[in-house]
Amino acid sequence: MSDLSNRRILLIDDTPSIHEDFRKILTPTSAQHTELDEMEAALFGSEVKPANLLFELDSAYGGQEGLGKLLQALQENRPYALAFVDMRMPEGWDGAQTIEHLWEKDPLLQVVVCTAYSDYSWDELLERLHAHDRLLILKKPFDNIEVQQMANTLLTKWEMTERASVQMSHLEHLVDQRTAQFKQASEALQREIDERKQLESQLVQSEKLASLGQLAAGVAHEINNPIGFISSNLGALDGYFKQLQDMLDAYREAESAIASSEVIEQLGKLRERVELDFLREDIPLLIKESKEGIGRVGQIVKDLKDFSRVDSNQEWQWTNLHQGIESTLNIVANELKYKADVVKEFQQLPDIECLPSQINQVIMNLIVNASQAIGPERGTITLRTGLEGEKVSIEIADTGSGIEPDNLQKIFDPFYTTKPVGQGTGLGLSLSYGIVKKHQGDISVRSEVGVGTTFRVELPVRQSWPA
Ligand SMILES: Nc1ncnc2c1ncn2[C@@H]1O[C@H](COP(=O)(O)OP(=O)(O)OP(=O)(O)O)[C@@H](O)[C@H]1O
Ligand SMILES: [Mg+2]
C-alpha cells in the first residue's frame, strides 16, 4: 500500500512572500532541515523521521491558475493530496470560490484555508462549502510547526482515505464476484430442480405405461383363448354350413319324388316361413363378417401384446430408415392422396440397428395420425430426418388441428382417442411409445392448436445391450 503515499501539496496565494515562507517550512534546505528535525524531536520524540517532512510543493498565485495545476496533475495521474488556499485574493476567484472549483474536480483533495481575515463568517464559509468535517483553518500569522503538522496529518488522512476507497472497491468487487457465484449456483440449482421435475414426470409416465402394459398383456392373454376358439369355430361353422347347403340342395331335388301333394305344400309353406333362400344367402355373410370382426379383435390383441412387449422374437437388423419411411409411405399412399402433400427433408443417414417392422409401424402410426389430424382442407406433412452424434431423428410435422396442452400428456395413454368409435382404438401412440423405448430412444411432441403438430423420434444408431 506504500504506493498510495502522496506528498504533493498545492499552495494558492496571491502574495509571493507567502510562497517563500511555505517553501522554507515544507521543503527546507538541509540546515533548516536539521533545525526542524530538532524541533520535531523535541516536540514528538525522536522517532519522527526527517523523511516525513519532505513535501513536494507547487505554487499558484490565483484560483484559476490553481485549478489549472490541479487539472494537469489529475491528468498526469499524480493528484495533489493537499491544497493551502488563501481566503482573500482580490483578483479572480476568492478562496471560497477556488475551493468550490477544486473540490468539484477532485473531491478527495484535503484543503486548508489560510487567512488573516475573511469576507465571510466561518459558519457561512463552512455552510457554503458543505465542509464542516473536511476543511481546516489556518490563521495568519502561523507557526512553522503548525503548518508542518497540518501538512503531515492531512497527507496521512488523504492516504488513509485513498486506502479505504481502494479497499472499498476491492470489497465491492468481492461482493460482485460472490453475488455472481450465488447467482450461478442458484441458476444451476433451478436447472437441477427442473431436470428432476421432468425426470419425475417421465418416470410417472413410464410407470403408468408399464403397469398399463402389464394389464394389457393380461387382458390380451385372456382374450386370446376365446378369440382362438371363436375363430376356429367360425371356420368349422362355415364348413358345416356348406355341407348343410349341399344336403338342402339334395333334399330339394328329392322333393319331386314325393307323391303326397299335401306334404309338398307343407314343405313349401315352411320354406317360405323360415325364408330359406334368404337364410342360405345370409348365413355365409354373417359368418364372414364375424370372421372379420374376430380378425380385428385379434389385431387389437396383437397390438396390445406388442405394446406390452410380450412377443419379442423379432430380429435386430441394420437398416436404412429412409427405406422404411418410403415403404410406409407407399402403404399409406391411398390415405394421404386426397388429404396432404408430403414434403421430404432427408439428410444422409447411416444404417441403424433396429427391429425394422416395428420402426415402420411407429412411422406409419405417426403418418396416419398426421393425416387424420388434417381437416377438410388439404394440408402438408413434412418428414424430416437428421443425424446428431450417435442418434438419428425423424420428425413428422403436420398442419393439422393441433393438440390442446391439457391433452398432450394423455395422448400416449393406451386407448386414449378423440376419434369416433370404429375409427381409432387409441393404441397407435402407446404402441409407438413402447417400441421407441424398446429401442432406447425417445419420442416427443410439440403442438399448437390450429397450427399443427410435430412428433419427433430419436433413435440411437447402435443399440447398447446390457452386459
Ligand atoms: N398429429 C396429431 N395431431 C393431432 N392430434 C393427434 C395427432 N396424433 C395423435 N393425436 C391425438 O392423440 C390421440 C391418440 O393417438 P393414437 O394414435 O394413440 O390413437 P388414435 O389415432 O386415436 O387411434 P389408433 O391409432 O389406434 O387408430 C388421437 O386420438 C388424437 O386425439
Ligand atoms: Mg393413431
Image (cartoon, helix red, strand yellow):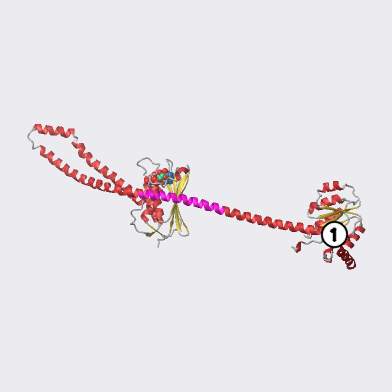
**18 relative to 47 in the view: left or right:** right
Q: Residue furthest left?
A: 259
Amino acid under disc 1:
Gln
Disc 1 crowd rating (10 Å Cα; few below 14, some 14-19, many 20+) is some
* Residue 417 percent across, percent down from the top left: 39, 43
Would you say residue 336 is visible in this rendering? Answer: no
- Which residue is tagged 1? 149
Q: Position of residue 110 (x, y in %)?
A: 81, 55
Residue in the picture at 26% in, 43% down: 290
Residue 312 found in image quarter: bottom left
The foreground one among 331 and 397 is 397
* Between 289 and 406, the one nearer to me in the picture: 406
Q: Would residue 158 appear left or right of 402 to someone viewing this image?
A: right
The N terminus lies in which quarter of the figure?
bottom right
Q: Does the magenta run of residues contain 450?
A: no
Q: Is residue 200 magenta?
A: yes
> Across the whole image, how many numbered discs are drawn on residues?
1
What stretch of residues is rendered in magenta? Answer: 187-214
SS assignment for the magenta stretch, majority:
helix
Q: On the picture, is 414 further left or further right than 116?
A: left
**Which residue occupies 63% across, 54% down?**
179
Q: Secondary structure at mark 1?
A: helix
Picture layout, residue 278 above or below residue 311: above
